[in-house]
Amino acid sequence: MILTLLYAELRRDEGVRTMPYKDTKGRLTVGVGHNLTASPLPAGWSFPLSAAQITQLLTVDVASTMTQLDANVSWWRSLSEVRQRVVANMAFNLGIAKLLGFKNALAAMQAGDWSSAAAEMQDSDWYGQVGARAVRLCQAMRTDVMPVAAGIA
């Protein structure tokens, strides 16, 4: 998978913040969707975060997401690169436990039934909560083409 594309997509979808804020669930967050309660900043870091610090957090968070996917959805790496990025994006956004709740979507993905996988993704609370991100990810799951958005090459 081309990680630079996933990083860019996550920056677009999550936003980039140098100062802490409360996310839609009330969790203290910074950088690119980095949950400060679950994973505090390294010792000695202070706000505002630098671009390098944000990238470091994102790199660690994406690596953790992929490790959790490997442990729980072992077949995900057999998907096309675009569909891998869809699964990784969802896992990053939802967390692995909530992603695993998408049983029908995951079963359809594993079976290569892309239309059903996208329909199952669309038929969820998540779809209504994340808006344009979900529309893009469902389209990418269905077509194996990630829609290009401003700022992403």
Image: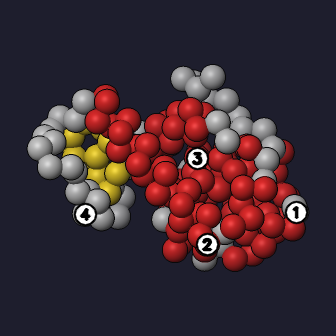
- Which label's residue is closer to the chain start, 2 or 3? 2
In which quadrant will I find the N terminus?
Answer: top right
Dot 2 falls on a residue whose secondary structure is helix
Mark 1 or 2: the one toward you: 2
Does residue 66 lie above or below 54 as drawn? below
Residue 87 left/right relative to 35: right
Classify mark 4: helix, strand or loop: loop
How far separated are the C-alphas under marks 2 and 3?
23 Å
Is there a contact, CB below 8 Å, between mark 2 and mark 3? no
**Circle 3 sits on which residue?**
133
**What residue is at 87 percent from the left and 67 percent from the top?**
111
Q: Residue at label 4?
A: 37
Judge the density around disc 4: few (<14), some (14-19), many (≥20) Cα neighbours within 10 Å. Answer: few
* Label 4 – label 2 distance at C-alpha: 23 Å
Residue 126 seen = no
Q: Is residue 12 above or below residue 101?
A: above
Picture coordinates of residue 148 (x, y %)? 67, 29
Residue at 60%, 76% (x, y): give it: 101
Q: Earlier in the sequence, mark 3 or mark 1?
A: 1
Which quadrant, please, contains the C terminus? top right
SS at badge 1: loop
Q: Nearer the viewer, mark 3 or mark 4?
A: 4
Q: Dot 3: what SS?
A: helix
- Label 4 vs label 2, nearer the camera: 2
Residue named by callout 1: 113
> Would you say residue 148 is visible in this rendering?
yes
Earlier in the chain: of badge 3 and badge 4, it is 4
